[in-house]
């Protein structure tokens, strides 16, 4: 089990980005959470197997049709097993 912390910047709020991330995570078998930040970014914490996380990140880097992802920061880490599903907050 691996973990990534992801911050996405650009036009990522108000375009259905969090719902998109949650749907893709569930489709890929990834657990974690996604939230908006006060600075207009979206933050994701995701855990899963390497192949699932890579596929998840490939889709998230593009985002939904009305989004425009301009910057993506990914910090890898060890999975914690804390999450049982994928949630949307903030």
Image (cartoon, rainbow, N blue to C red):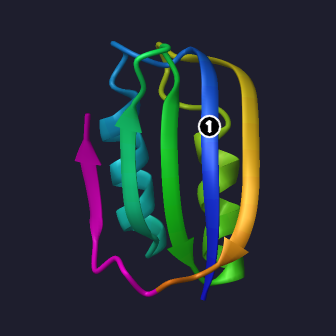
Answer whether residue 89 is magenta in the image: yes
Q: Is residue 8 above or below residue 80?
A: above
Find residue 69 and report its horizontal and vertical position in percent: 65, 21
Q: Is residue 72 above or below residue 50?
A: above
User: At 55% across and 31% down in the image, what residue appears?
Assistant: 63
Find residue 48 and report its horizontal and vertical position in percent: 55, 79
- Residue picked out by circle 1: 7
Q: Image check: 77 left or right of 47?
A: right
Quadrant of res 55 = bottom right
The one nearer the camera, 46 or 37, is 37
Q: Is residue 13 above or below residue 26?
A: above
Q: Image check: 41 left or right of 49?
A: left
User: At 52% across and 22% down in the image, what residue appears?
Assistant: 41
Judged from the image, the secondary structure of the residue bearing numbered disc 1 is: strand
Answer whether residue 11 is magenta in the image: no
Find residue 73 and report its horizontal and vertical position in percent: 75, 39
User: At 26% across and 34% down in the image, what residue appears?
Assistant: 90
Q: Image check: 57 left or right of 76?
A: left
Characterize the local packing of mark 1: few (<14), some (14-19) or many (20 or more) Cα atoms within 10 angstroms: some
Number of on-image labels: 1
Outermost residue to the front: 38
Quadrant of res 35 = top left
User: At 42% across and 45% down in the image, what residue appears?
Assistant: 21
* Quarter of the picture holding the N terminus: bottom right
Quadrant of res 11 = top right
Please tell me whether the stretch drawn in magenta is mainly helix, strand or loop. Answer: loop
Q: Which residues are magenta?
A: 81-90
């Amino acid at each position: 089990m691996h973990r990534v912390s992801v911050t996405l910047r650009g036009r990522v709020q108000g375009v259905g980005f969090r719902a998109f991330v949650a749907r893709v995570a569930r489709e890929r078998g990834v657990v974690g959470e996604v939230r908006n930040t006060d600075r207009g970014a979206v933050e994701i914490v995701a855990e899963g197997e390497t192949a699932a996380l890579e596929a998840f990140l490939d889709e998230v880097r593009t985002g939904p049709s009305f989004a425009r992802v301009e910057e993506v920061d990914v910090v890898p880490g060890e999975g914690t097993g804390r999450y049982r599903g994928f949630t949307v907050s903030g």
